[in-house]
Amino acid sequence: MDKQKIIEQIRAHKNQPCLDFRLKTTTEAFTNTLFYTLFDTNTPLLENLEKLEQQFEILVDLACWDADKPCSKVWDRYVQKLPAILEKLNKDAQATLNCDPASLSIEEVYMAYPGFYAIAIYRLSHELYAEGFPLVPRLMTEYAHRQTGVDINPGAQIGNSFHIDHGTGVVIGETAVIKNNVKIYQGVTLGGLYVAKDLQKIKRHPTIESNVTIYANATILGGDTIVGENSIIGGNAWITESVPANSTVFHTPTIKIKPTKNHV
């Protein structure tokens, strides 16, 4: 076996000079530090803020391939937003406690609810996405996706008091807009009506107005699709056009039960 030849062939096919997987592992460490800084009682705030700044400097070196992009200035703006992000997340946690009869305490929501964790990482990543910071926001939400089964693109716009129950299989696309006091259940998709690369700058995902509940496995597609406020979308519904305010939409399945003969 000619190992040197194999090495040369592998190097020849490595055509992504910036593909340094330290960016992924450093982003995950940064995400964990952020979460603990906001929520863990025993985490020293000053020490962790300094640690976060050091981790972010590494992310700048790894992620900002454009030398003219002032990535190093992002941190000062971002860290000032953390109190407001925490305020929003406390409202999300309270919404979950209020909505879910299975939740026994607010501490349980913070520590055990995958939907809340996914929302937390989304909100922390969204502000970096809004800054145009490359790749890191997506790596943050993919890290949460891997742990929770909830896939929220950091570009989505989500209002206050958002609740995801159970969470597994939820997909929220990049240009989705979700207003205040919205509840969604497992398996819900807020997606595009169809996929084409030239739609990258176009709103492809639906708008969900305030006080809407979307039950399990409902699919709502299209950038022009608006679900009006105070509406209820039933489980397994498939929606590709707008729904007026104060509506109830439900899917009626056909269930047939065929009795079997008893055999001796």
Image (tube, helix red, strand yellow):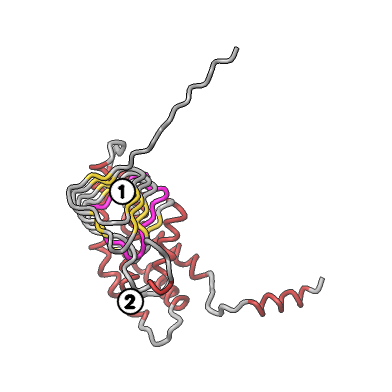
| Image quadrant assignment for residue 192 | bottom left
The range drawn in magenta is 161-178
The amino acid type, in three-letter code, at marker 2 is Val
Q: Are marks 1 and 2 in contact (CB under 8 Å)?
A: no
Relative to 101, say whether 41 is above or below. below
Residue position for label 2: 74
**Which circle marks residue 34 in the picture?**
none
The answer to whether residue 185 is magenta is no
The furthest residue to the bottom: 68
Residue 168 in the magenta stretch? The answer is yes
SS for callout 1: strand
Q: In the depicted view, which residue is nearer to us: 186 or 9? A: 186
> Residue at position x 40%, y 57% from top?
151
**x then y, percent, for residue 177:** 27, 61
Q: Is residue 129 shown above or below 165?
A: below
Query: Which residue type carries mark 1?
Result: Ile
Q: Which residue is disc 1 drawn over?
A: 184
Residue 96 image offset from top left, x and y in percent:
27, 45
Earlier in the chain: of badge 1 and badge 2, it is 2
Residue 34, how many percent across, how many down?
36, 61
Q: Nearer the viewer, mark 1 or mark 2?
A: 1
Q: Quarter of the image for the C terminus: give it.
A: top right
Which corner quadrant holds the N terminus?
Answer: bottom right
Which residue is pictured at 71% across the width and 77% down the height?
9
